[in-house]
Image (tube, grey):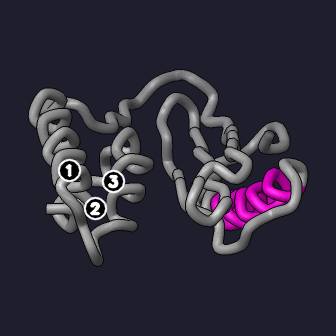
Amino acid sequence: MVGSLMYLLATRPDLAYSVCLVARFMERPTEIHIAVVKRIMRYVKGTVGYGLLYKKTNIEMQLNGWTDSDYAGDLDDRKSTSGYVFMLGEGAISWSSKKQPIATLSTTEVEFIVAVSCSCQCIWINNVLKHLKVKQNKSTI
């Protein structure tokens, strides 16, 4: 079931955090993990018409990015979960939510780690946009 949910993440970023969180426990799932998967499936069933829609608009195609993270959010190993999203105009074009591979000593350190990851993705997206001849009038923030 979790594999099927992972497939949906390509068009359903609203599922990213919860599906990735429950996927961590699939090696030895318990009753509560199965209950969480069933709850996610009920959510998907109720929101089956949801998804990403990209339509032609007159809005400027400016690239904007946001990041966020929690400090030591996993109570088992004190590792942080962080993520980012990039919007081009009104549509999300790139996103990530993942547990950090290392435990950090401060909230500043975890914010720095996610900022580096986000910056790498931003550079890559800007290169793709240049290749597609999508002009950016301002720096990405």
Please tell me whether the stretch drawn in magenta is mainly helix, strand or loop: helix
Q: Which numbered dot is residue 19?
A: 3
Instruction: Give the extent of the magenta segment.
Output: 109-127
Look at the picture and state if 87 lies above or below 73.
above
Residue 93 spot, x, y in % from top left: 50, 48
Residue 122 spot, x, y in % from top left: 71, 57
Q: Residues within 10 Å of mark 3 (few under 14, many from 20)?
A: some
Q: Earlier in the sequence, mark 2 or mark 3?
A: 2
Q: Is residue 18 visible?
A: yes
Quadrant of the image containing the N terminus: bottom left
Q: Which residue is mark 2?
A: 6
Q: Which residue is mark 1?
A: 37
Which residue is depicted at the point 64% across and 52% down? Answer: 82
Quadrant of the image containing the C terminus: top right
Secondary structure beneath dot 1 equals helix
Residue ranking furthest to the bottom: 27
The reply to whether dot 2 and dot 3 touch (C-beta < 8 Å) is: yes
- In the image, 76: left or right of 11? right
Secondary structure beneath dot 2 equals helix
